[in-house]
Amino acid sequence: MAVYYKSRRVMPFMNLKPLHILVVGGGIAGIMLALLSERRAFKVTLIEKSKEWRPVVGAITLTLNGVRLLKEIGLFPAIEARSNEIRNINIADEQGEILSSFNLDGYADYAKTVTILRHDLHNILLSHLHTTAVHLDTTFSSIENDDNKVKVTLSNGHQQYYDAVVGCDGINSTVRKAVFGKRSNKYAGYSSWRFIANNLPQPHSDTITEMWGNGKRFGIVPVSENSVHCFASVNTTKNYVAYSNISIAAFKNLFTDFGGPVPGIMASLEEGHELMYNDLEDVPLQKYHKGRVILMGDAAHGMTPNLTQGAALAIEDAFLLVNKLTHTSKVEKDLAAFHLERSKRVFAVQRKSNLLGRIGQLKTPALCGLRNFCWKNIPDKWIQNDLKNLLVSR
């Protein structure tokens, strides 16, 4: 499956009357869309419910499909200066024995894969906004398609008409609820903790490792030579209180059956270390466009993080959307065209990510043994080709 936009660039575009777009949500998807919209000379308003930009724990993996687009618009040098390059992606068993390995050196001429602290990426993107009107501590009370505009009532009581509204407000999107009605996300059957471990004695520099146990996984994502972003997942019921309020001691005890680098990482954690716990879900929404309102990023196609495609897909979304938008009189057709072209790819990635998660979270020892045997004996080139089709433009 091809990734889009290799030959498409965000070019300045002058309407007789510039489009006025409301972006709801100030995460990576929303800021990226605002930044690219500015380059099309659109008028952009961005609202964010948080009262201030505050650091979010954890790191992001920017795979080469997203990095390629960031390079095209000149943003990657600033990101590269704060990031760590990844050269290998390994799947291992719970003791660290490699089952498969994906080397990225062959794609260096196309783009790199890097990891970066989430708040560093956020701040870099924010620093490149110039004309966008940003309103913190602001949300909306209603969104209505109204003839050739969208009427929005903001949380401060002000009413405003926009040519288009884009919901970039995450996997629990309030725009999605307001426009498409209340719909439940689909729980994947497992939950995860994320955390940063610093000052590790064993260096972790250029290899992402995901370790598969019985109903558990542990992922190690280097952020620098002695700092890693980790995720640890376990099969459980949704909203399991004992896990959402787990102590460090109990958390460590859950993963005592893991070897390799895991014991050393766990030893660095002390009570009070920040763990972010989430139930992992998919957004099962087949249509995310209605009139002049559209969803983007996790709001439209939130998925399990097994392919680390959340950030890259949001960047792809933003590029395609701003290239589809043309004139105020054609917004509905442009949004429909975006949805038609985009949905096939994002739903395919969502399904692939969900399948990989189910394989990694197998619990029965016999099935896990068979899984590991089969995965180890699959030729690495098959996995290379599968990931190449996912990440690289043809």
Image (cartoon, rainbow, N blue to C red):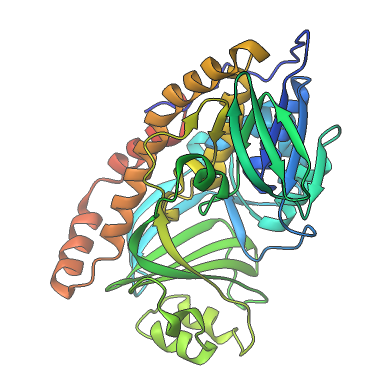
Image coordinates of residue 41 in percent, x first then y, are 79, 20
Q: Residue at x 61, y 38 (%)?
A: 143
| View extreme (top): residue | 16
| Quarter containing the C terminus | top left
- 137 to the left or right of 58: right
Q: Residue at x 68, y 20 (%)?
A: 10
Residue 68 appears in view: no
Image coordinates of residue 206 in percent, x first then y, are 56, 56
Compared to residue 387, the image places residue 226 above or below, namely below
- 146 to the left or right of 387: right
- 164 to the left or right of 34: left
How many dots with numbers?
0
In the figure, residue 94 lies in which quadrant?
Answer: bottom left
Front residue of this view, candidates 91 and 154: 154
| Quarter containing the N terminus | top left
Image coordinates of residue 267 in percent, x first then y, are 55, 86
Front residue of this view, candidates 98 and 223: 223
Compared to residue 82, the image places residue 34 above or below, namely above
Image coordinates of residue 272 in percent, x first then y, are 64, 87
| View extreme (right): residue | 130
- 228 to the left or right of 89: right
In the figure, residue 111 lies in which quadrant?
Answer: top right
Residue 103 appears in view: yes
Q: Residue at x 65, y 64 (%)?
A: 225
Compared to residue 263, the image places residue 278 above or below, namely above
In the figure, residue 276 lies in which quadrant?
Answer: bottom right
